[in-house]
Amino acid sequence: MPSPKDLDPSSSPRAMIGAELRHARESAGLSQSDLGEPLFVSGSFIGQLESGTRRLQLEYAVRIDEILGTRGFFERNCRALARSKYPDHFVEAAEAEALAAAIREYATLLIPGLLQTRGYAEEIFRAYKPTAQGEEIEALVTARLERARLIGHPTTPLLWVVLDEAVLRRRVGGRGVMSAALLHITALARQHRIIAQVLPFSSGAHASMTGPLKLMEFEDAPPLSFVEGPDMGKLMDDPATVARHNLTFNLLQAAALSPQDSLALIESVAQDYGHGDQHP
């Protein structure tokens, strides 16, 4: 396991919790594995809590207070941080994403959240919540666009996406919405901010037929993978599972068009939408 780096507790509430957890554990003379054992988690998991890569869940906070004798400190802070602007099943993944040094994602049917435009995101959330009031939709869209700010940095994280061709062909909103959404991706690629590939229909069966996949790597913590379905998601750190998902993504990259050919295809489809020539 990589040696832990010094955290800046002022950088975020979760970094503060991680720094306090490390201090309390070391003061008790316990290793990460020692603390993980009664919690039935690995030492690596404790390391991810201390580095801020993972959110401390209430059930663990209560038990940690008991083990370390911290008089409810972690439970109180965990409850205070429990509210999130993200759905419950995506909270941990979104927070880990913001700390990642590299993100690799395979998208099956829609443009990944980090790459969505306002118009595209509005259409997605309206489809998810057809009876929601405008204020609720606006809050969801704002949270998604704020999350996407992490790619505003010129170099980190490395973002590599493989888009199924269905992402390009499924029209979300009007032709103008789709054209703008696809041109946003090509602009980021031409600015060398992201790497994008398209997995064409002609590839046939592939390594991730069952759904989307996200992989995240960190400078000071083990990698994670995230799989998602309707109103559910699972963040995984098991080395064998993450290694298998890493192989899956590698196979998707190999089956996809080259970045150059992918860029040409995305721009072509965007132009067709813009000219009104793209058939539904």
Image (cartoon, helix red, strand yellow):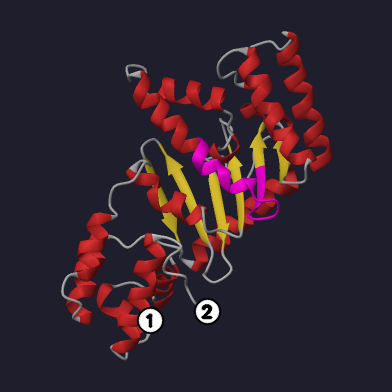
Q: Which residue: 20% across, 74% down? A: 65
Q: Are marks 2 and 1 in contact (CB under 8 Å)?
A: yes
Q: Secondary structure at mark 2?
A: loop
Mark 2 closeness class: few <14, some 14–19, many ≥20 residues within 10 Å? few
Q: Which residue: 36% across, 37% down? A: 231
Q: Indicate whether 134 appears above or below 55.
A: above
Does residue 257 appear in the picture of this structure?
no
Residue of label 2: 1
For the C terminus, the quadrant is top right
Task: State which quadrant residue 44 falls in.
Answer: bottom left
Q: Amino acid at mark 2?
A: Met
Task: State which quadrant residue 56 falls in.
Answer: bottom left
Foreground residue, 91 or 247? 91
Q: What range of the chain is rendered magenta?
A: 145-161
Q: Amino acid at mark 1?
A: Gln
Which numbered marker is on residue 32?
1
